[in-house]
Image: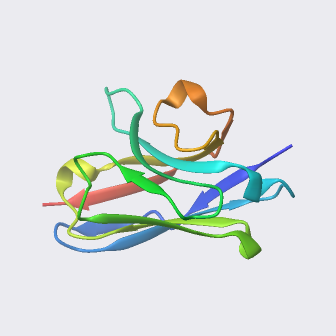
Amino acid sequence: QLQLVESGGALVQAGGSLRVSCTGSGRAFRTYGMGWFRQAPGKEREFVSVISRTGVMTDYADSVKGRFTISRENDKNTVYLQMNSLKPEDTAVYYCAAGPQMATMKEEYGYWGQGTQVTVSS
């Protein structure tokens, strides 16, 4: 079993930076690809980024490329999302998820955290 808990969400001014974290409690954390998704009010949950089991491969949604960076520290059972140059449209609940290697569809993920709120003010 794998349990995931996000943290680090906050209210940030447009143009600012924020890092959110996700920590897993399961011993199998390092065997999963890890993804970040976000969901704004009235919108579907959308893919943000994904990182492979060892962190060698990463992928990003076009909307965040060049601004966000995903990373992981398997010895800490933690995955991070560093968010720079934040925009109001980045406002959403951010969720981490564990699934297969490099998956970009939310339906492919089997484990989810509770989410952490990120609000970007204009």
- Residue at horizontal 43%, vertical 46%? 93
57 lies above or below 32: below
85 lies above or below 104: below
- Along the viewing direction, whichever of 21 and 110 lies nearer the viewer: 110
Residue 91, horizontal then vertical, whole percent: 29, 50
- Along the viewing direction, whichever of 28 and 78 lies nearer the viewer: 28
24 lies above or below 18: above
Quarter location, residue 86:
bottom left
Q: Quadrant of the N terminus?
A: top right
| Left or right position of 71 against 27 | left
Which color scheme does this rendered protein use?
A: rainbow
Extreme residue toward the front, this view: 56
- Along the viewing direction, whichever of 115 and 53 lies nearer the viewer: 53
| Left or right position of 78 against 59 | right
Residue 28, horizontal then vertical, whole percent: 83, 53
Q: How many marks?
A: 0
90 lies above or below 74: above
Quarter location, residue 121:
bottom left
- Residue at horizontal 70%, vertical 52%? 4
Residue 63, horizontal then vertical, whole percent: 22, 48
- Residue at horizontal 23%, vertical 64%? 66
Residue 76, horizontal then vertical, whole percent: 73, 74
Q: Quadrant of the C terminus?
A: bottom left
| Left or right position of 70 against 87 | right
Quarter location, residue 70:
bottom left
| Left or right position of 51 against 67 | right
